[in-house]
Image (tube, grey):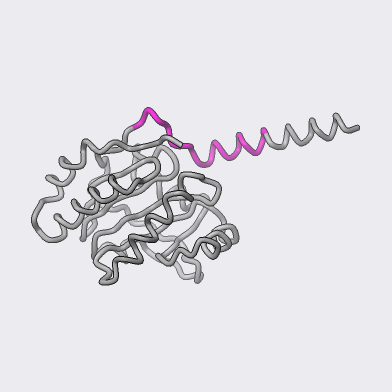
Amino acid sequence: MRVIRIAIVVVICLTAGIWLSQRVRIAAPERNASFSAVSSLPDFTLPDLDGRKRSIREWADRPLIINFWATWCAPCRREMPLLQDLYATNTNRSLNVVGVALDNEQDVRRFIEQIGVTYPILYGEDAGARAADSFGDSFVGLPFSAFVAPGGEVLALRAGELYTDELARLIAELDAVASGERSAEQARVNLSDVPSRTDP
């Protein structure tokens, strides 16, 4: 009887793993998402944790970081304090940070309360995955981040966990475009040698 129970648990776990891998892909190490294949911000609408439908373009008036994540994604969980610190120290709100959880509301709400994230969070399992897919082939898995200049020009897309040095360089280019020091195209070229990092 015990062997049958173990077999049932194994089958259930395998089925769940296959189902999950088909819905949301894990970041593939061989892919590099340095250049943005999408030049302008796709428009998508998802609910926030207050239940309001929000268009991502609401935040496109300033430099914008869109971070796609999930509660079960370890690299996503590791990089969120870095994004929270960035958001918290940006007291003049010259930079917008928006998280998009490819997860259900209950899990997202519980996780956000635990770690104390204060930047806007949108969520949606299938709808969130479609929003990430709207950035084209650069979306290879989670975590995935888009760096968008004011007005909606996408400067860079990054697959994999963000690190402090890489994030500082991306923000410097966002600021340069926002201030008019650099064109979006120049910023894209400057960022082309910053590799996506997909190591665990």
Q: Quadrant of residue 161?
A: top left
| Residue 157: percent from left, percent from top | 30, 44
Residue 42 left/right relative to 155: right
Give the quadrant of the N terminus: top right
Please state which of residues 107 and 54 is positioned toward the viewer in this rendering. 107
Vertical position of residue 164 compared to residue 20: above or below: below
Provide residue 120's location: percent of width, then percent of height: 41, 65
Q: Is residue 99 above or below residue 11?
A: below
In this picture, which residue range is highlighted in magenta?
14-31
Residue 37, picture quadrant:
top left
Task: Kindly identify the residue that appears in the image at 55 percent across and 36 percent down.
Answer: 21
Rendered location of residue 166, percent (x, y): 28, 45
The extreme right residue here reads: 1
Number of numbered tags placed on the structure image? 0
Question: Which residue lies at the image location 46% right of the left edge and 70% below the top edge?
Answer: 52
Q: Is residue 20 left or right of residue 80?
A: right
Where residue 49 sits: x, y (%)? 50, 67
Q: Is residue 29 magenta?
A: yes
Residue located at (24% from left, 66% from top): 94
Asked which quadrant contains residue 66, the reply is bottom left
Magenta stretch: residue 52 in it?
Answer: no
Extreme residue toward the left, this view: 181
Of 168 and 71, which appears nearest the observer? Answer: 168
